[in-house]
Image (tube, rainbow, N blue to C red):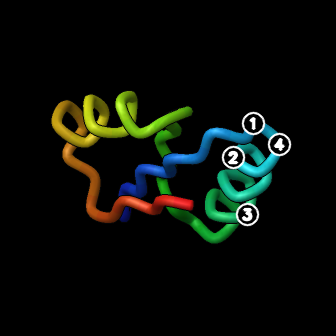
Amino acid sequence: MTKILLVEDTEDIREFLAHRLRRRGFEVELAEDGEAGMRAARQRRPDLVLLK
């Protein structure tokens, strides 16, 4: 399964996009800002990082 790290500071948008991606079969990790996104990318090694 493709792992996606979604970095978005607005909670409503973050949850909306995560829901849509999960419905399409992706494994989604969330980060609320760039700093958290960098930490998550180093630790979880996603296949794709989406920044909004």
Q: How many marks?
A: 4
Query: Which residue matches tag 4?
Result: 12
Q: Secondary structure at mark 4?
A: helix
Q: Secondary structure at mark 3?
A: helix
**Residue 14 disc label:** 2
Badge nearest the viewer, 3 or 4: 4
In the rendered structure, the answer to whether residue 19 lies left or right of residue 39 reads: right
Residue 9 horizontal/vertical position (percent): 63, 39
Q: Residues within 10 Å of mark 1 (few under 14, many from 20)?
A: few
Q: Answer yes or no: do the residues labelled 1 and 2 have beta carbons within 8 Å?
A: yes
- What is the distance, in whole Å, between disc 4 and disc 1 at their CAs? 4 Å
Residue 47 horizontal/vertical position (percent): 27, 62
Residue 15 horizontal/vertical position (percent): 74, 44
Q: Residues within 10 Å of mark 3 (few under 14, many from 20)?
A: few
Q: Answer yes or no: do the residues labelled 2 and 4 have beta carbons within 8 Å?
A: yes
Q: Secondary structure at mark 2?
A: helix
**Residue 11 disc label:** 1
Indicate the amino acid at tag 3. Answer: Arg
